[in-house]
Image (cartoon, rainbow, N blue to C red):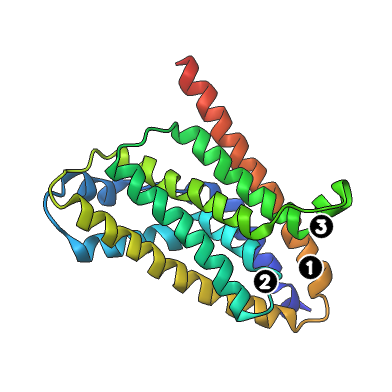
Amino acid sequence: MPRIRAPLSALGLALLGGPAFAHAIGGKDAAFVASSAGAHVGPFLYLGAKHMVTGYDHLLFILGVIFFLYRLRHVAIYVTLFSLGHSVTLLAGVLLGWKANPYIIDAIIGFSVAYKAFDNLDGFKTLLGWAPDTRLMVGVFGLFHGLGLATKLQDLHLSHRGLAINLVSFNIGVEIGQLIALSLMLGLILLWRRSKGFARQAAIANVLILIAGFVLMQEQIAGYILHRSA
């Protein structure tokens, strides 16, 4: 029984400590990025990968996306749609100087986590009798996830020297980190599906993901209100 419950327990612990890890680029990483002038391919590859594998919001959304995908081809299609979306807005957002309120964008990202979990629980079909196109929504939410990354990089006032190369390196690093995280999550889910209690535990897990998404969204909305009133 402990072996069967282990994935659900691990997910619960991750959700309890998760919001602190959502999106932030801080400390020595932020200082390095802010002071970098010229091309630094290796460090930005590393930072992109690190950001993804420690990014609570990204990981939860990807987990929700792949939770009930049973064919590798389908996993590849959905993850590619997400990757294309966040790559476009990450690169364009920084290079073209798109301005967006980070609290609003991160609130939408939190909503995306809750949305996918609600979709996994057949919430839309139960309430509406139909569900939005999942592939379309994954691509659309990917755009917001990329814009969230862009707002964090914009806050660091990156040097224009080597900016394009560093951004592409960071984005490739994000993709590498995503592949690492995806491989680990798929492996755990495949093992989890072999347990007798998977169906019941999967519903509980998605309820936890749903709650985490709303908590993250609420935190960002509160931050926006406090920022506006300051």
Q: Tell me the number on the disc at residue 201.
A: 1
Q: Quadrant of the C terminus?
A: top left
Establish if 87 lies above or below 7: above
Does residue 45 appear to the left or right of 56 in the view shown? Answer: left
Circles 1 and 2, Cβ within 8 Å, touching? The answer is: yes
Instruction: Say what secondary structure mark 3 lies in.
Output: loop
Q: Residue at x 21, y 66 (%)?
A: 42
x, y percentage for residue 196? 83, 81
Establish if 115 lies above or below 122: above
| Residue 173 visible in the displayed image | yes
Establish if 195 lies above or below 228: below
Q: Tell me the number on the disc at residue 122.
A: 3
Q: Nearer the viewer, residue 172 or 185?
A: 172
| Residue 185 visible in the displayed image | no
x, y percentage for residue 170? 30, 59
- Tell me the CA gap for discs 1 and 2: 9 Å
Q: Amino acid at mark 3?
A: Asp
Q: Earlier in the sequence, mark 1 or mark 2?
A: 2
x, y percentage for residue 91? 33, 50
Mark 2 vs mark 3, foreground winner is 3
Mark 1 vs mark 3, foreground winner is 3
Disc 2 marks which residue? 7
Q: Residue at x 52, y 60 (%)?
A: 82
Q: Residue at x 27, y 46 (%)?
A: 30
Q: Nearer the viewer, residue 118 or 83?
A: 83
Instruction: Say what secondary structure mark 2 lies in.
Output: helix
x, y percentage for residue 109? 55, 45
Instruction: Give the crowd class for mark 1: few <14, some 14-19, many >=20 residues within 10 Å.
Output: some
Circles 2 and 3, Cβ within 8 Å, touching? The answer is: no
